[in-house]
Image (cartoon, grey):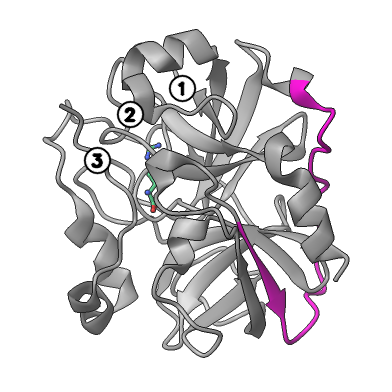
Amino acid sequence: MFRLTRARRTAAALAAGAATAATALFTAPCAAALPQPVVGGTTTTTTAYPFVMQITDASGNQFCGGTLVAARKVVTAAHCMVGETTNSVRVVGGRTYLNGTNGTVSKVSRIWVNPDYTDATSGDDVAVLTLSASMPYTAAKYVSASDTGVYAAGATARILGWGTTSESGSSSNQLRTATVPVVSDSSCRGSYGSDFVASDMVCAGYSSGGVDTCQGDSGGPLLIGGVLAGITSWGNGCAEAGYPGVYTRLTTFSGLVSAQVGS
Ligand code: ARG
């Protein structure tokens, strides 16, 4: 029985504040203590990765990540937008530290959630935010529908975020990053059974665990060859052996994303 930890922001969690919402989500038992983003990684900056955005509540509490793909467009996870409205969300660019005050804060004028989305483990976990203000940062390129070759098993993928640095830990004040290998669909199916929807998801992580995204990293980028190829979506706990992180397979949704980016 999997205990899947997704960012389900309940009314209570929302009332308690988005920053604490992530920590309220832990349902999985603790894995062996693992030091390091993101579980197992290193600190980095938004100077090095200028397209990595914090998604915060109206008070500035970060609860998800996002990727700038055009001056006013941010790709994130649909599950990050559950219960959100254009008034409840902000996007912060150019801010390496959660407790920083620098960078650019934008309101959101439109939230597009994939209309097929119901639940992260059913797939379709993609959303596009339209910003009220332009972000003066370099946008990321994202995959096109024909780029499915990027998900070759063993390919190196980069993950980024401010999420918890262990399954039961706290968020990182500084942006963190790590690399993880793409896992084959058959292997991921072996881990997650029918919750793994190969058309909509791609898995990444070491079979021994130790390096993974975790709570608060959702919506943030999975880069392959420097190009946005996935969106942090879900997993069984974090960094557990045999349970890689699951990311939205962006090639499946790049047409839908492009339609939003162009609108
Ligand atoms: N659902 C989490 C979030 O909202 C991301 C979980 C990723 N889990 C993993 N084991 N890779 O932040």
**Label 1 SS:** loop
Of the pair 227 and 147, the residue shown nearer to us: 147
Q: Which residue is drawn at 77% across and 18% down?
A: 149
Number of residues whose C-alpha sits closer than 10 Å to that of mark 2, classed few (under 14), some (14–19) or many (20 or more): many
Residue 33 in the figure: left or right of residue 118: left
Dividing the picture into quadrants, the one containing residue 82 is bottom left
Q: In this view, does 18 lie above or below 195?
A: below
Residue 78: tell me if it is visible: yes
Asked if ligand 1 lies within 8 A of label 1, the reply is yes
Residue 180 place in picture, x, y as percent = 53, 24
Residue 60 belongs to magenta span: no
Residue 65 place in picture, x, y as percent = 53, 59
Q: Residue at x 22, y 73 (%)?
A: 13
Number of residues whose C-alpha sits closer than 10 Å to that of mark 1, classed few (under 14), some (14–19) or many (20 or more): many
Q: Residue at x 78, y 64 (%)?
A: 260
- Mark 2 sits on what residue? 239
- Mark 3 sits on what residue? 167
- Which residue is farthest right? 262
Dividing the picture into quadrants, the one containing residue 234 is top left
Residue 195 in the figure: left or right of residue 73: left
- Mark 1 sits on what residue? 205
Q: Is residue 96 above or below residue 230?
A: below
Of the pair 128 and 89, the residue shown nearer to us: 128
Contact between marks 2 and 1 (CB within 8 A): the answer is: yes
**Label 3 SS:** loop
Q: Bounds of the magenta span?
A: 127-148
- Which residue is farthest left? 29
Contact between marks 3 and 2 (CB within 8 A): the answer is: yes
Most common secondary structure along the magenta stretch: loop
Dividing the picture into quadrants, the one containing residue 155 is top right
**Label 2 SS:** loop
